[in-house]
Image (cartoon, grey):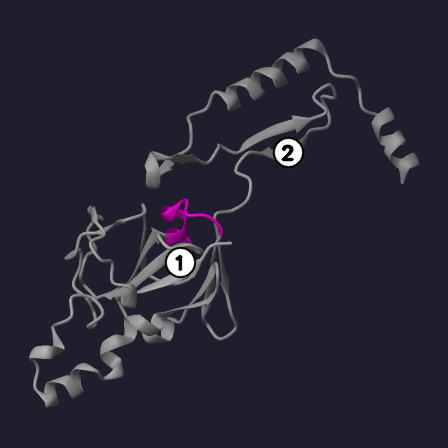
Amino acid sequence: MMDELKTMWATVPPGTPDDLAGARRRLLDGMDGPPARRRILGGGRAIFTGPRLLVAAGVAVAAVAVPLVIGDGDPAYAVAKNPDGTLIVTIYELQDPEGLQAALNDQGIKADVTYNPRDKKCAPGRFVGADYMYGSPDPRHMTAEQRQEFYRPEHWRSRDVTRPIAKDKFRISPNFMRHGETLVLEFRLGNDPGVGWSLGTWLAKAGSSVRPCTLVDEGGYDKEHAKEMAGG
């Protein structure tokens, strides 16, 4: 193998000064590109994801250019599809909600993803809920017959669409969704020790647009409607 490589390199002519100048200019042009989008999280901290920069290795050799990827680093999330149609979402870091939303859309899940700072949540009324998980009536003022109808499982599908399965993973079961509905995922940095983040999950009714999140104080965030995930 080494003899073959030596033979290959022996046939490559050395780079000229113009080749070197051109390679250096292309490298500097890439470094001067616009910064990537940033996401502001709790405490005013801005998290940047650096641009992907392709650099030619062996710039002294004009005939050979091996691309190397620099920047970005580890992914913030991963989405994997199981044979049964469910999705496993792994959250490594609360970054790039738009990317996670696009990844879910690519898997056939119409989604709206928001990452919120600690002690903040989205103001209510962003969308019309597809079931009682979002903006439900108060069962204390219902008759026994109304309460029986109220607690039927089909009125609480949002609860079953997502299930935590590990400290940084949750499962999405599309079979609990109906055509045209939007899965609304609202992440929030955790308050309690050992809790990295919590996830509020709801279904928006088909035809109901999901308005942008307006942050408000937590004010007793309903943990019954949020799935807390332990940090690692």
Residue 95 lies in the magenta-colored region:
yes
Q: Is residue 60 visible?
A: yes
Q: Are marks 2 and 1 in contact (CB under 8 Å)?
A: no
Three-letter amino acid code of the residue under disc 1: Leu
- Residue 179, given in percent of the width and then of the height, sits at 28, 70
Residue 91 lies in the magenta-colored region:
no
Three-letter amino acid code of the residue under disc 2: Leu
Residue 124 lies in quadrant = bottom left
Q: Give the residue drawn at x 48%, y 47%.
A: 76
The span picked out in magenta is 92-104
Q: Residues within 10 Å of mark 2 (few under 14, many from 20)?
A: few
Q: Give the residue drawn at x 27%, y 82%.
A: 153
Q: Is residue 178 visible?
A: no
Residue 134 lies in quadrant = bottom left
Q: Give the residue drawn at x 17%, y 81%.
A: 150
Q: Is residue 119 left or right of residue 132?
A: right
Marking on residue 196? none
Q: Is residue 5 above or below residue 32?
A: below
Marking on residue 68? 2
Mark 1 lies on a secondary structure that is: helix
Q: CA distance from mark 2 to mark 1?
A: 29 Å
Q: Is residue 27 above or below residue 139?
A: above
- Residue 55, given in percent of the width and then of the height, sits at 62, 28
Q: Main secondary structure of the magenta part?
A: helix
